[in-house]
Image: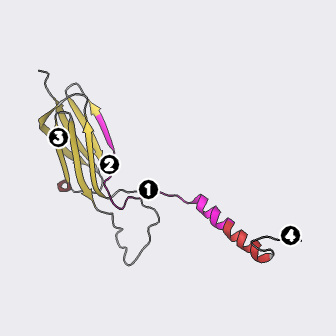
């Protein structure tokens, strides 16, 4: 007769099947890196012409007043602000979070340029969730 520390019989087989079902479900779930606190960095594309840098910052869901753009020095620009958690229209009462991939809370991004920029000339515009920042390259002295 074979003895096991977990027991034997139909009860153990049933428990084993339930554990296998749980493991199968876990293998098929998606997990994400949810940040409930701390700062996050928005994604950026940078284009360069002979005379300027064009930054495209992905900041969907923000009001222009909630974003600050400043030249820290001739080779760095900082984009800072805060994004609130999106709220589903018409959702009332308690709910669970099934997937949280949209970053929220304070954000901070410093861009380092290979060439100095003119810190006196910053153009900022908004287009469908993108913030466009144009920085003229500094004149060579």
Residue 63, quarter of the rendered image? bottom left
Front position among marks 4 and 2: 4
Disc assigned to residue 2: 4
Q: Earlier in the sequence, mark 1 or mark 4?
A: 4
Which residue is the extreme one toward the right?
1
SS for dot 1? loop
SS for dot 2? loop
Q: Earlier in the sequence, mark 4 or mark 2?
A: 4
SS for dot 3? strand
Q: Earlier in the sequence, mark 3 or mark 1?
A: 1
**98 over 133 or under it: above or below:** below
Q: Residue at x 32, y 57 (%)?
A: 38
- Which residue in the protein does label 2 denote? 41
Left or right: residue 7 versus residue 22 is right
The residue lying toward the viewer, choosing from 127 and 50, is: 50
Relative image position of residue 51 (x, y in whole percent): 19, 27
Q: Earlier in the sequence, mark 2 or mark 1?
A: 1
Query: What is the distance, in whole Å, between disc 4 and disc 3 at their CAs?
Result: 74 Å
Neighbourhood count class around disc 1 (C-alpha, 10 Å): few under 14, some 14–19, many 20 upward: few
The residue lying toward the viewer, choosing from 11 and 27, is: 11
**72 over 97 or under it: above or below:** above
Query: What is the distance, in whole Å, between disc 4 and disc 2 at their CAs?
Result: 58 Å
Left or right: residue 91 versus residue 47 is right
Disc assigned to residue 72: 3
Write down the region rendered in magenta.
20-46
Q: How many marks?
A: 4
- Which residue in the protein does label 1 denote? 33
Query: What is the distance, in whole Å, between disc 1 and disc 4 at their CAs?
Result: 46 Å
Query: What is the distance, in whole Å, between disc 2 and disc 1 at their CAs?
Result: 13 Å
């Amino acid at each position: 007769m074979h003895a096991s520390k977990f027991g034997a019989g139909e009860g153990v087989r049933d428990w084993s099947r339930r554990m296998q079902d749980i493991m199968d479900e876990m293998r098929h779930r998606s997990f994400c890196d949810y940040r409930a606190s701390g700062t996050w960095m928005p994604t950026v594309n940078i284009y360069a012409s002979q005379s300027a840098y064009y930054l495209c910052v992905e900041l969907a869901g923000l009001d222009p007043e909630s974003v600050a753009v400043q030249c820290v020095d001739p080779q760095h620009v900082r984009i800072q602000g805060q994004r609130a958690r999106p709220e589903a229209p018409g959702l009332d009462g308690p709910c669970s979070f099934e997937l949280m991939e949209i970053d929220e809370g304070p954000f901070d991004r410093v861009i380092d340029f290979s060439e100095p920029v003119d810190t006196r000339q910053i153009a900022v515009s908004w287009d469908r969730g993108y913030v466009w920042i144009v920085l003229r390259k500094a004149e060579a002295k």
